[in-house]
Amino acid sequence: MNYREASKIARKAERGFGLPSDATLRFIHRKLEEQRGRTITVAEVPGLAGTELCGLWLICADRDIVIHAPAKSSWHRQQIILHEFSHMILGHDLKTKGSERFSTLLPNLDEQQILRTLARSSYTDDAELAAEALADQLATRIINSDVGAKPEPLAFRKVFG
């Protein structure tokens, strides 16, 4: 699959997810929790700093956990989280089997509770490419949203888009 094909899949998934034009990361988070019928915890894990892995989705019996490496900016943090949320929107947990051991990174989490794991480290497979394409689209929607934006002098957005 190439990025163009992944973008088509992502557009279809985004339409099916049904976001309003003024979406935010918080809104997407809440909508996913409602849709999945479970809590989604998002946490930064300093132990991921300097590793190849920047994001991880742990699918537990009673909740989902999205962990991410410390990010250099709020935009980067948002992109990592949106990528993991995109896996959820695309239903990738239904296609994944098994889990990996992360006891060194998450010593307080009972490994028996983790049913499946999706880790973000590269974009070499179709699922990763589709999730990144959807994350890009969601990020664009958030950036173009007026929610929380400060008033612009002289209606800059209306004039220049």
Image (cartoon, rainbow, N blue to C red):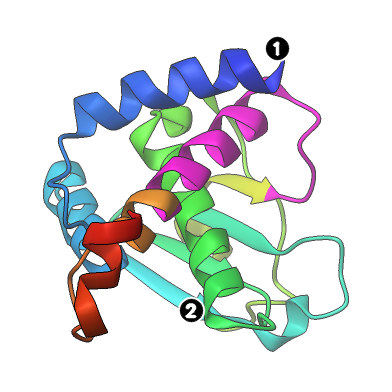
Is the residue 106 above or below the residue 84 in the image? below
- Residue 149 visible within the image: no
In the image: residue 97, left or right of residue 39:
right
Quarter of the image for residue 39 reads: bottom left
* Residue 158 versus residue 1 in the image, above or below: below
Among the 4 quarters of the image, the one containing residue 146 = bottom left
Q: Magenta span: helix, strand or loop, mainly? A: helix
Q: Which residue is mark 2?
A: 43
x then y, percent, for residue 83: 53, 50
Question: Which residue is identified by label 1?
Answer: 1
Q: Residues within 10 Å of mark 1 (few under 14, many from 20)?
A: few
**Residue at point 65% right, 30% down?**
129
Of labels 1 and 2, earlier in sequence is 1
Residue 150: percent from the left, percent from the top?
A: 22, 86
- Range of the magenta residues? 120-139
Residue 129 magenta-highlighted: yes
The total number of labels drawn is: 2
Amino acid on which disc 2 is placed: Ala
Which quarter of the figure is the N terminus placed in? top right
Residue 13 in picture, x, y percent from top left = 33, 25
Q: Secondary structure under badge 2?
A: strand
Amino acid at the residue labelled 1: Met
Q: Residue at x 34, y 36 (%)?
A: 89
Q: Is residue 26 magenta?
A: no
The residue shown at (54%, 60%) is 79
**Mark 2 packing: few (<14 Cα in 10 Å), some, or many (20+)?**
few
Asked whether the residues under the numbered discs 1 and 2 touch, taking CB atoms below 8 Å apart as contact, a structural biologist would say no
- Residue 105 is situated, as x and y percent measured from the top left of the image, at 71, 77
